[in-house]
């Protein structure tokens, strides 16, 4: 069933090039210069999911801000807590700050700030990231974990959005899906 698009959604779909990948967005990331941990990026309309940016992208921008702030720390990301607080899109600011930096772990808070309808900047996404050093030995015995399910390879899977109207003809699939290759390995399509 096709759903009528708003004029803004139709215009956004009309100007989107299929080559607007995450790498290009991250390349546009710039330091705001006012302090360490302040960055600016512009979210292309192709990353929108209705009135806001695709949540995974908002979290990825917060992580990029945290990683750039922690550039001298080689610890990998171990945990993330993400809160989607409000809508985001267009020019955004990312504010990252170290909560605690230790020998084995570091905690970084990162917030994505976006303009509200009133025109002021407000938090749209708030994240806390834990970066941690590798431990010499895990207490988890992998032999005791249940086996992973057997799934077909990518060449044997159908695209998830197969059979839906092409982008630009309906609101489903969401616009941001053009940046992903999504395959259905098991179960029914969404």
Image (spheres, rainbow, N blue to C red):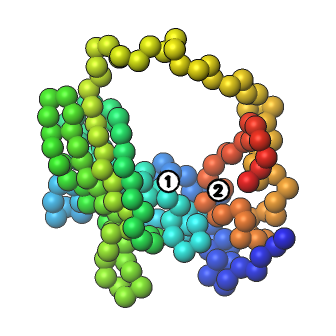
The residue under the point 57% across, 57% down is: 20
Count residues near mark 2 (Cα–Cα under 10 Å), then give few for <14, some for 14-19, many for 20+. some
The residue under the point 45% across, 72% down is: 87
Front-most of 77 and 94? 77
Left or right: where 80 falls relative to 135 = right
Percent x, y of residue 146: 59, 20
Percent x, y of residue 105: 21, 33
Say which quarter of the image contains residue 102. top left
The residue under the point 78% across, 31% down is: 155
Sequence order check, earlier mark of 1 and 2:
1
Q: Give the label on residue 56, or none.
A: 1
Q: Give the label on residue 130, or none.
A: none
Percent x, y of residue 188: 79, 46
Whether residue 93 is visible to the viewer of this picture, yes or no, is: yes
Say which quarter of the image contains residue 11. bottom right
Whether residue 44 is visible to the viewer of this picture, yes or no, is: no
Q: How many marks?
A: 2
The residue under the point 34% across, 36% down is: 77
Count residues near mark 1 (Cα–Cα under 10 Å), then give few for <14, some for 14-19, many for 20+. few
138 above or below 117?
above
Work out which quarter of the rendered image holds the C terminus and state it: bottom right
Percent x, y of residue 162: 81, 52
17 above or below 105?
below
Q: Which residue is mark 2?
A: 177
Work out which quarter of the rendered image holds the N terminus and state it: bottom right
């Amino acid at each position: 069933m096709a759903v009528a698009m708003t004029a803004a959604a139709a215009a956004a779909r009309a100007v989107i090039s299929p080559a607007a990948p995450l790498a290009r967005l991250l390349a546009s990331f710039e330091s705001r210069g006012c302090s360490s941990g302040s960055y600016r990026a512009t979210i292309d309309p192709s990353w929108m999911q209705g009135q806001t940016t695709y949540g995974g992208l908002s979290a990825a921008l917060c992580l990029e801000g945290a990683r750039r702030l922690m550039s001298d720390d080689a610890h990998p990301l171990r945990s993330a807590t993400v809160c989607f607080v409000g809508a985001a899109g267009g020019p955004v600011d990312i504010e990252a700050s170290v909560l605690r930096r230790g020998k084995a772990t570091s905690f970084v808070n990162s917030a994505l700030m976006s303009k509200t309808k009133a025109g002021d900047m407000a938090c749209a996404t708030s994240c806390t990231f834990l970066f941690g050093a590798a431990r010499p030995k895990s207490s988890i015995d992998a032999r005791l974990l249940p086996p992973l399910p057997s799934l077909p390879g990518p060449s044997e899977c159908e695209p998830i959005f197969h059979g839906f109207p092409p982008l630009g003809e309906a609101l489903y699939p969401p616009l941001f899906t053009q940046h992903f290759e999504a395959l259905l390995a098991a179960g029914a399509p969404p």
